[in-house]
Image (cartoon, helix red, strand yellow):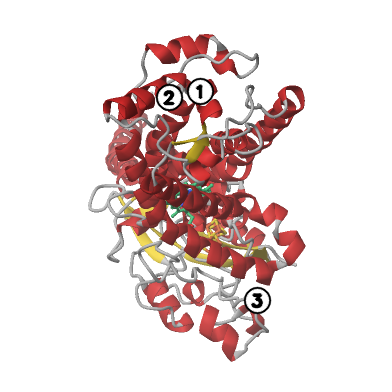
Amino acid sequence: MTRGGFGRRIAVAAFVALFSVCLAMTLAPRAGWAQQARQGVNPTAQAVKEEQLLKELDRVTGRVSIPDSKAGTLIQPEGREWRAYHERTLHWIGGIAILGMLAVLALFYSVRGKIRIEHGWAGVKIMRFTTFERFVHWLTASSFIVLALSGLNVVFGKVLLLPLVGSDAFAVFSQWAKYAHNYLSFAFAAGIVLTFVIWVTENIPNRTDIAWAKQGGGILGHAHPPAGKFNGGQKLIFWSVVLVGAAIAASGYVLMFPFYGTNIADMQVAQIIHGVLGVLMIAVILAHIYIGTLGMEGAFDAMGTGEVDLNWAKEHHSLWVEEEMSKARAAGGGAAVPAE
Amino acid sequence: MARVKFLCDGDRCIECNACVTACKNENEVPWGINRRRVVTINDGKPGERSISMACMHCTDAPCKAVCPVDCFFTTADGVVLHSKDLCIGCGYCFYACPFGAPQYPRVGNFGSRGKMDKCTYCAGGPEADLTMAEYEKYGANRLAEGKLPLCAEMCSTKALLAGDGEIIAQIYKERVVKRGYGSGAWGWKTAYREGIDV
Ligand code: HEM
Ligand code: SF4
Ligand code: SF4
């Protein structure tokens, strides 16, 4: 080995060492920057993600510069669920409730027939409902019928009526139906309040109703379980009209004043409550109409003229007749029958 | 025929609201109604994103399904339009729309909320193309003139894309691949039942 060779080796080693240091010095910060760049510049690292927002909150909302808070809801996939409710579920509920009730009533009529006055017409009448009571009943009933038909038009009209009359006529009809639904709502709401006020005391459930219910109200057999002014079935109708009617009116006014303190989810719920209770109430009222007209001899007079046949009254409301009789006796009049 | 769609690239939108203004002007949109709006999510926080939203012209549109007078129709291009002559202003389309697109001239629902108004994809309405009657009720019909919706055409950052759904999806995909990130095609899964996978 020569000195020169040794010197060269040292020179090479020194060069290699120097080169490595330089390389390390240049590369090390680069690597650091690269890492930093990926974190600092990647603008999606913290970006909001649609899927995540939908998973966490069901809907995507944000801030808008226009003065309409509803517009801040960017995406509400629930709209599709509400659509499924409105176009499928509600159609099924309404169809089953209303057609089902009609079928039950038809079956009942074919089996039981018209419930006759067993002892025949007495020919003597007894006052059952005053003019004011009948006014309240017909105020509620007539507005209900218009509300029911115009409400059903919103749900089933485009399936049942539109193909028959065509788009233009159907739109005109629907517009008027909507006016009727919205304006007559006040008559209906007033009717519900008055119904409650005039009849609530006579509709408090009591023991008589239990006995009445145990005998099935005498609906199927020929029994005539005792009952006061209103029997158990009528009390049931009273309370469903008052309570369900109030809920329908309340939800209806929410629909009529949309987004007054409500958001889109509240509106959808109000809509569902209104629609479902509406079609169910229609089914209940069909039974009520049936028993007041076709189903029972002598019943319609109560709301027609206000006076019912004494034998009818004795058979269906024995306790009430006794009460009226004793009231008349106490009043000193010989006539037990207030009206001819 | 093409199936037209909207796509808002949230990573490009700078919330300038030019699309909103362009739409209002081009279509003479009545006071109080905004066919397009820009919603800012996580405003002022890290990860904030702005999305320009109008009617997405959904596949199997919910508004169309729930309308009690059945006044909607979908054009051959996939644009969802409605007839203001038939509309009774019930407000149901707003309950069903996932994107808050339908708007009404009146706030209360007493009698009617008035004729519903929404983005038409600058495609007018059921009236004959480019007539005054069409313009007064629905605004411009740029599609009939061979042009795209003005909002997207004049978007300064090209965040808002309009046109054939497949082409704008392709443009978006290329962007995402090139820049290496993308917060997704907002609303596409809800509106079209398909996202854009990159
Ligand atoms: C105070 C009473 C009521 C008010 C304020 C009211 C209001 C409304 C409103 C605002 C709507 C939305 C559609 C429209 O704008 O026209 C509606 C729909 C409807 N209403 Fe009423 N309503 C009332 C009573 C009733 C009653 C008594 C019934 C049933 C017998 C009824 C059945 C319906 C039905 C079935 C719908 C359609 C629901 C649907 O499409 O899902 N409403 N009502
Ligand atoms: S975005 Fe709303 S208004 Fe537009 S098509 Fe879809 S459901 Fe209808
Ligand atoms: S507001 Fe008009 S377009 Fe909307 S669902 Fe009602 S009738 Fe149809």
Query: For the residue marked with disc 3, what is the amino acid?
Result: Pro
Q: Which residue is mark 1?
A: A314
Marks 2, 1 in one chain: yes
Q: Chain of mark 1?
A: A
Q: Secondary structure at mark 3?
A: loop
Q: Which residue is mark 2?
A: A321
Given this view, does label 3 or label 1 mark the residue nearer the observer?
1
- For label 1, the crowd category at 10 Å Cα-Cα, with few meaning under 14, some 14 to 19 and many 20 or more, is some
Residue drawn at the location 33% of the way across and 54% of the way down: A259
- For label 2, the crowd category at 10 Å Cα-Cα, with few meaning under 14, some 14 to 19 and many 20 or more, is many
Residue drawn at the location 55% of the way across and 71% of the way down: B120
In the rendered view, would you say A92 is above or below B44? above
Q: Secondary structure at mark 1?
A: helix
Tell me the CA gap for discs 3 and 2: 67 Å
Q: Is residue A114 left or right of residue B84?
A: right
Q: Are marks 2 and 1 in contact (CB under 8 Å)?
A: yes
